Amino acid sequence: MDRITDLIKKSPFVPIQKHMEVSLTSTEELLNFFESATQSKWDEAQTTRRKIVDLEHKADELKAEARSLVPKSIFLSVPREDVLELVKIADEIPNIVKNISGLMIGRHMEIPTALIPNFMKFAGECAEVCRIASDATNQIDELFQFAFGGNAAEEMQKLLTELDLMEDRCDETEIILRSELFKIEKDLPPIDVMFLYSVINKVGELADTAETVGHRISLIASK
């Protein structure tokens, strides 16, 4: 068991797990950012934006660490290309968060009052998808220790099922949110409408990317 633990420590999955923790924290900070932005508290939003940028830089460091371990790793049961692809996909999460906050802070972009309830619901659901993906990433240790079988595999499957259900919920809320925006868009400046749709798209990308991370882990485990 000590040798297995040592293998895990030398594998690129340790920094990937840390990377997902940072990514999850960035999505939580994005919710704080939205809370401030929807109340026009732009000084608070700017402070949160700086935290998000710092987290994205930390994620980049962990991404580099994971990549540096791939050619040195003796975790031979996992193809190098699969690990690199997982790192690439996972790193999109903090990047998207930074892009969303940057887009909104630059314009002091406000969410129309009528959209705020479902916008915040949508954002919270997308953050929840990221949390489940992070939980799935943390299961890698047990999957490896038990040769991707037994209770560890069952727990992973439960997480993936939960991941898909929550992502479907995000899609449903996004449809409602878009419908609400469509009803009022004629009363808004066209450029504001364009940016609102862009933000909604990017928030949806968070959930899509997190779901892909979870399924990528499952794919790796099945090989």
Image (cartoon, helix red, strand yellow):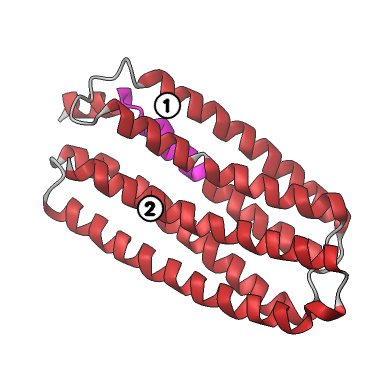
Q: Quadrant of the C terminus?
A: top left
Q: Which residue is mark 2?
A: 135
Amino acid type at circle 1 is Ala
The secondary structure type at the circle numbered 2 is helix
Q: Give the tally of numbered discs.
A: 2
| Percent coordinates x, y for residue 155 in the rendering | 23, 58
Q: Residue at x 88, y 70 (%)?
A: 189
In which quadrant of the rendered view does residue 217 lie? top left
Residue at 84% from the left image edge and 68% from the top image edge: 190
Residue 122 visible in rendering: yes
Q: From the viewer's perspective, is residue 26 above or below residue 125?
A: above
**Residue 16 among magenta residues:** yes
Residue 215 is left or right of residue 127, and the answer is left
Asked whether the viewer can see residue 138, the reply is no
Give the magenta range.
Answer: 9-22
Question: Which residue has dot 1 on it?
Answer: 66
Residue 15 drawn in magenta: yes
